[in-house]
Image (tube, rainbow, N blue to C red):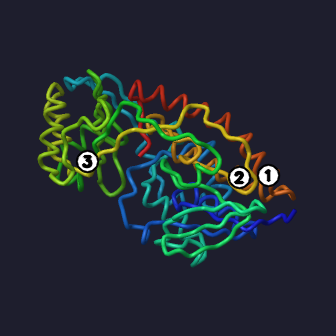
Amino acid sequence: MSQHPTIAIIGGGPGGLTLARILYLHGIVATVFESDAHPLARPQGGSLDMHEETGQYALHLAGLEDTFRSFARYEDQGDKVYSPDGTLLAEKSGQDDNRPEIDRTQLRQLLLDSLPDGMVRWNQKVKSIQRLADNRSAVVTSEDQEEVFNLVVGADGAWSRVRALVSDAVPFYEGVTIAELGIDEVDTKHPEIARLIGHGKIFSKGNGKTLIAQRNDYGHIRVYAALRIPENSLNIDIAKPERAKEVLESEFSEFAPELINLITTGKFIGLRPMYALPIGHRWNNQVGVTLIGDAAHLMSPFSGEGANSAMIDAADLAMSLVQKSDWVQAVKDYEDKMFPRAEVAASGAAEGLRGGVSVDG
């Protein structure tokens, strides 16, 4: 079989772009289909901590270590834990963790800048993927344009269209909904919040509720108000942000004023119900199609593993394709390596959701 199959990557997030970059370094050109109209078409989320053995290793294989370090915030690895009454329970600087932070927008842009023009096809929403008799796949976009590939990689997130080609698993609600808010220019306009948070993240949890605030670059704070509630039961109209904040303030009324101030000061961004795939999600290998990242093993962000897992998936798949002459076997070998690793990460994420201990942007 040909060493270099024609490859379609569905989704231009950290996983899909990391895969495209590493393949490109080794002379394999993939096509990335991205539904966003441009890189800043929608908010990319908060800050990510890049783990040495996964996200950072993938960036090393992508030849982007130095570029990453120019953005990485090693000073923002700290954690503080507060009780709901505002008492500081624990604090660590995180300086020895080697899990520096980088904003999602910055990570995506440094990956995009490393790819040649035209490799990412913007505003290309995939309408369907049709399997052909010879194990190739026809990718059909919303404009009814069709292109055939030997290998289709689903990097298209929680509600992946590619997943249905290999698995009948669908995400389920995990019982927690997160409201997101943002605070700009915290150091100059809100010094009391800057002092509360320090350099990194803070957590406060009690009575089925968790309040998290995370420092991003350029003095921006991302706030996550998490509630353990039935799905769609929070009486919030996202079209009425001020009213949404009032509802959240009421939900967190037992928290200290300085913690509620994170909600009062923040700009309401939206709601994120937490969904996951079953822990240990696997599928029988299908020639010509595979999954990486959330498409393969969607998990809650309460472990800090989401983007890191997607990027190490991408790195493992890319290097397997580069190093093996039989690309069909290369994909199978990648899956065999990914499945047990993803199961461990998903178990940790589920445990983290129960404890509310960390968050991945």
Along the polypeptide, which appears first: circle 1 or circle 3? 3
Evaluate if marks 2 and 3 touch, with contact meaning CB atoms under 8 Å apart.
Answer: no
| Residue at the image point whose x is 69% and y is 65% from the top | 7
SS label for mark 3: strand
Frontmost of labels 1 and 3 is: 1
Residue designated by label 1: 330
Quadrant of res 264: top left
| Residue at the image point whose x is 59% and y is 54% from the top | 162
Q: What residue type is labelled 2?
A: Leu
Quadrant of res 234: top left
Q: What residue type is labelled 1?
A: Ala
Task: Name the side, left or right, on which 237 lies relative to 156.
Answer: left
SS label for mark 1: helix
Residue 163 point in image, percent of width and height: 59, 49
Evaluate if marks 1 and 3 touch, with contact meaning CB atoms under 8 Å apart.
Answer: no
Disc 2 to disc 3, C-alpha distance: 35 Å
Frontmost of labels 2 and 3 is: 2
Disc 2 to disc 1, C-alpha distance: 8 Å
Q: Which amino acid does label 3 sit on?
A: Leu
Evaluate if marks 2 and 1 touch, with contact meaning CB atoms under 8 Å apart.
Answer: yes
Residue designated by label 3: 181
Along the polypeptide, which appears first: circle 2 or circle 1? 2
| Residue at the image point whose x is 49% and y is 32% from the top | 349
